[in-house]
Amino acid sequence: MKIVMGDLNAKIGGDNEGYEDVMGRQALGEIINNNGERLRSWCSTNSLKIGGSLFKHKNIHKGTWRSPDGTTVNQIDHICFSSRWTSSVQDVRSYRGADVASDHYLVMARIKVKLKARSVTKNATKQPGFNVIQLKDEEVHTRYNVELQNRFEALEWATNIADEWENIKQVFNKTAETVIGKRRGTKKERWITERTWKSIDERRTLKGKKEQIAGIGGDIAKITEEYREKDKEVKKNCKKDKQQWINQKANEAEEAAEVGNTKVLYQIVKELAGNNTSRPPIKQQGEH
């Protein structure tokens, strides 16, 4: 959002003919001076709107400067903003009561902007994280620590903190990629084990072979039977993995409840419930 504001010494007048894309008809006065004409032309070229001309107010709330003799009030201070943000600007006016030790009045704009949580392109895909669950395996954990220590021993330290942090980050990332690799699947598929992922890959390979044989008019009976058997294996493994994951989470929740760790308890219940509930139906002991 582009905003240009300040004492521009520009009288833009109330007539917006030819400049409807730049201003409304609420500006103070009818006289347009040279700076006013230049401002209107410049805003038109750069797709800006002059905020003080858009909102209906009393004249005392439009004037931005009073002459030294106190008889003349002009609107020469302006707030201009990008045209595409017009709906976000809710008001522009001057405030005479602000004590700013100046012959200019304070000019303010009220802007309401709804920001996105993060800037992501429509077709962008989120990169999967590391398969940290493997670190629970003592052998993998030990191998990870050894690899990490070796990489740090070979690390050449940088002279400035930015480069040093980048080198340290690369050490951790490269170690994780080498030892544990990326996590497969989405967050909802985190319960699938490596054994089942291997079966899924084998099923995908068989499907490709079946389509290839069918494409050349070959006999697909044998490969079709292999595919069906592998499909049964995948479904059986998925069912088993899901049940094991639920049992594991239930045990973790029970352990958290026994030690009074309600934070972990609520996290596990929300993880199991998904988006079905924002407040898991759990009561601490003694609640009624």
Image (cartoon, rainbow, N blue to C red):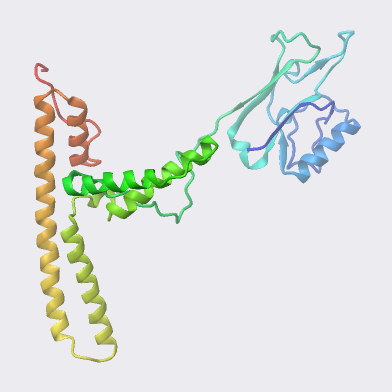
The residue closer to the viewer here, 32 or 248, is: 248
Q: Residue furthest bottom?
A: 217
User: Is 267 on the left or on the right of 104, as rendered?
Assistant: left
From the top left corner, tell me how far across and down residue 176 is, in percent: 32, 49
From the top left corner, tell me how far across and down residue 278 is, in percent: 25, 33
Q: Residue at x 88, y 31 (%)?
A: 32
The residue closer to the viewer here, 99 or 215, is: 215
User: Is 54 on the left or on the right of 198, as rendered?
Assistant: right
User: Is 8 on the left or on the right of 79, as rendered?
Assistant: right
Up/down of 286 relative to 180, above or below: above
Q: Quadrant of the C terminus?
A: top left
Query: Can residue 182 be seen at all in this image of the molecule?
Result: no
Q: Residue at x 86, y 37 (%)?
A: 38
Location of residue 202 (image quadrant): bottom left
Up/down of 199 relative to 123, above or below: below
Up/down of 123 relative to 54, above or below: below
Total numbered badges shown on the rendered structure: 0
From the top left corner, tell me how far across and down residue 236 is, in percent: 9, 61
Q: Residue at x 13, y 21 (%)?
A: 284
Location of residue 204 (image quadrant): bottom left
Location of residue 60 (image quadrant): top right
Q: Quadrant of the N terminus?
A: top right
Query: Can residue 33 be seen at all in this image of the molecule?
Result: yes
From the top left corner, tell me how far across and down residue 169 is, in percent: 42, 43
User: Is 228 on the left or on the right of 213, as rendered?
Assistant: left
